[in-house]
Image: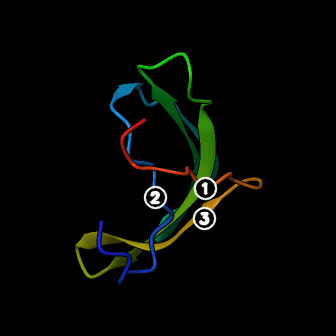
Amino acid sequence: MKGDIPVVPFPYKLDKVPMKVDVSRPRYALLEVILVPVSQKVKSQIFFIELRKFGSRWLVTSWVPRGRIAVPATLNE
């Protein structure tokens, strides 16, 4: 909300979050995640999430939009 972390904002309540595995390896995974908002006024957005295994933990190493995202004029839509 402050804008001081490198995360693409999606400030809406979510209805569902379907995922698709694009790449799966023993220590690496790439998934496509669709954020489907409750509001019909807001379009769904697709993101790529990259995960890598460090020791016994899976950590997110990348979270980027699949396409161009329109930045909302206000966060209260």
* Whether residue 20 is situated above or below residue 40 in the rendered picture: below
- Residue 49: horizontal and vertical position, in percent? 53, 59
* Residue 61: image location, x then y, percent: 46, 77
Front position in the image: 13 or 22: 13
Mark 3, other Cα within 10 Å: few <14 / some 14–19 / many ≥20: some
Q: What mark, if any, has residue 64 been given in the picture?
A: 3
Query: Is 23 on the left or on the right of 73, as rendered?
Result: right
Which quadrant of the figure contains the N terminus? bottom left
If you read the primary sequence from the N terminus, does the residue marked by circle 3 or circle 1 appear first?
3
Count of numbered tags:
3
Disc 1 and disc 2 in contact, CB within 8 angstroms: yes
Q: Residue at x 48, y 65 (%)?
A: 26
- In the rendered image, which residue does mark 1 sit on? 71
Question: Badge 2 local density, few (<14 within 10 Å), some, or many (20+)?
Answer: few
Residue 10 seen in the figure: yes
- How far apart in space, not on screen, are marks 2 and 3 (Cα)? 11 Å
- Is residue 21 in view? no
- N-terminal of the pair, mark 2 or mark 3, is 2
Callout 2: helix, strand or loop?
A: loop
